[in-house]
Image: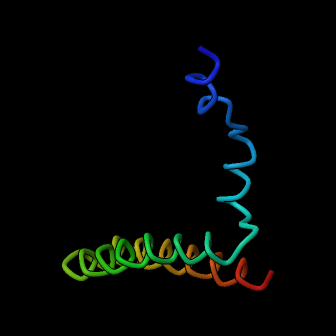
Amino acid sequence: MGVLLAPLAIDWSDVFLDIVLPKTDRTVGIQWAVLGPIWLLLLGYSWTQDRDIKHFIWGIVVITFAWFLARMIH
C-alpha cells in the first residue's frame, strides 16, 4: 500500500520554487517554449483590438519577457 502512495509524497513547495526561480537552464527553456507561442498568439490577437487593449496586452508581454530575461542571468 505504501508503494502506491509514494508518488503523492512530493514536496510541492520545491516544485513551485523551481518554477518561479529555476535551478537549471532546462526549466527556463521549457518556460520559454511554453510562453513563446502564447506571447505570439496574444500579440496577434491584440493587432485587431483598439489602442488601449493593444497597449495593455503588449505591456503584459513585455513585462513577462523582461522577467524571463532577468531570471536567465542566474
In x, y percent, where is residue 41?
29, 75
In x, y percent, where is residue 12?
68, 40
- Residue at the (61%, 69%) spot, across then down: 27
Quadrant of the rendering where the N terminus is positioned: top right
Q: Nearer the viewer, residue 46 or 20?
A: 20
Q: Quadrant of residue 44?
A: bottom left
Drawn side of residue 42 relative to residue 73, left or right: left
In x, y percent, where is residue 33?
45, 76
Q: Nearer the viewer, residue 58 or 37?
A: 37
Q: Residue furthest right?
A: 74
In x, y percent, where is residue 17?
73, 53
Q: How many marks?
A: 0
Q: Nearer the viewer, residue 1 or 28?
A: 1
Drawn side of residue 54 relative to residue 56, left or right: left
Drawn side of residue 21 relative to residue 19, left or right: right
- Residue at the (24%, 82%) spot, across then down: 47
Q: Quadrant of residue 28?
A: bottom right
Quadrant of the rendering where the C terminus is positioned: bottom right
Drawn side of residue 38 relative to residue 6, left or right: left
